[in-house]
């Protein structure tokens, strides 16, 4: 057998060992009669939910992309590597990132597992080209496990980054939204109508905040449970300023105090906090510019200032 065939066989054995380790880990974690019963109950619930959402999701689009996402969701539902607590945590992160579909968590889990397997397979196949240590199968096996874990973490970090960017965008537009909310309540509109009007006005300025306000207005209109709808808004946005707004509105509705005055005070506070944050960023700008100036501007200034003198000195030394 040639060395290339031996190396290919070793790579395939490493991938098989990875799948076997995952299967043994799952069997150990979910083993026993109780584990099997719980697993069957979970699979039945997932099948029921997939059956109820399949028609809804497919009605929205019948293209290749929609079918592919649905297949990913089915794979993510059947993955036994993630428990219910972890899925709930991912659901909150997906809601904060703007993904409200019932299949969002399942698609993310399938993507995590797929990216991990792709990274592990590439590491096994290309690991032999690593200098010095690439020729050792044990090193490639360790690298395969390490890259598999990193590959599963990357999609979650992408979702977290998107959620943080979305929160920053909504935080910058929140003072304007509060001012509009104060104007709408001063005009005599109810809370649901005011939130709907603010969502319509923010559609072109801040689409994420507009969509969250529109969803809250729909929940207020359909359910009538204002406390639950407002707390849902706080969970989806996850900003201290939004939580202060929800607390103010809840207390005003509970104790019968005027909402307009509370909103005006909160709007003034948020506007002042936004101005203070901008001033803080402007004050940090000067120290941050020191390193780029020393690396890129100062050498050019020194070369222009001292260049002619250095050239004349070199000419004088050459004549001697």
Image (cartoon, rainbow, N blue to C red):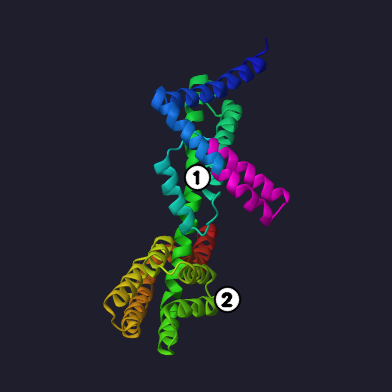
Find the distance from the CA under tag 2 to the CA under tag 1.
31 Å
The dot on residue 24 is: none
Main SS, magenta residues: helix
Secondary structure under the numbered disc 1 in the rendered image: helix
Residue pointed to by mark 1: 154
Q: Quadrant of residue 250?
A: bottom left
Q: Residue at x 60, y 44 (%)?
A: 51
In front: 59, or 126? Answer: 59
Secondary structure under the numbered disc 2 in the rendered image: loop
Q: Residue at x 54, y 51 (%)?
A: 102
Residue pointed to by mark 2: 204
Residue 60 in the magenta stretch? The answer is yes
Where is residue 276 drawn, in percent x and y?
33, 76
Q: Residues within 10 Å of mark 1 (few under 14, many from 20)?
A: some
Residue 114 in the magenta stretch? The answer is no
Vertical relation: 66 (above or below) 253: above
Span of residues in magenta: 49-78
């Amino acid at each position: 057998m040639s060395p290339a065939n031996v190396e290919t066989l070793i790579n395939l054995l490493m991938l098989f060992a990875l799948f076997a380790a995952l299967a043994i880990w799952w069997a150990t974690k979910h083993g026993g009669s109780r584990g099997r019963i719980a697993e069957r109950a979970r699979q039945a619930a997932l099948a029921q939910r997939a059956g109820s959402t399949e028609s809804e999701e497919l009605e929205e689009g019948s293209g290749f992309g929609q079918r592919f996402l649905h297949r990913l969701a089915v794979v993510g539902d059947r993955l036994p590597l993630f428990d219910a607590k972890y899925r709930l945590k991912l659901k909150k992160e997906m809601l904060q990132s703007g993904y409200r579909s019932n299949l969002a968590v399942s698609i993310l889990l399938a993507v995590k597992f797929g990216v991990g397997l792709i990274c592990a397979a590439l590491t096994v196949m290309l690991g032999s080209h690593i200098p010095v240590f690439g020729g050792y199968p044990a090193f490639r096996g360790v690298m395969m496990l390490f890259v598999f874990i990193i590959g599963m973490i990357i999609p979650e970090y992408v979702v977290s980054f998107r959620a943080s960017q979305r929160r920053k965008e909504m935080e910058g537009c929140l003072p304007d939204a509060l001012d509009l909310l104060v104007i709408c309540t001063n005009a005599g509109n109810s809370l649901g109508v005011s939130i709907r009007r603010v969502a319509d006005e923010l559609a072109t300025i801040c689409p994420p905040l507009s969509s969250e306000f529109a969803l809250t207005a729909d929940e207020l209109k359909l359910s009538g449970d204002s406390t639950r709808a407002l707390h849902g808004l706080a969970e989806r946005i996850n900003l201290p300023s939004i939580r202060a707004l929800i607390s103010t509105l809840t207390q005003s509705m509970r104790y019968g105090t005027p909402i307009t005055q509370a909103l005006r005070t909160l709007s003034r506070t948020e506007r002042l906090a936004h101005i203070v944050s901008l001033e803080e960023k402007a004050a940090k700008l000067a120290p941050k510019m020191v390193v780029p100036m020393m690396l890129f501007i100062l050498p050019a200034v020194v070369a222009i200032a001292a260049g002619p003198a250095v050239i004349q000195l070199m000419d004088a030394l050459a004549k001697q």
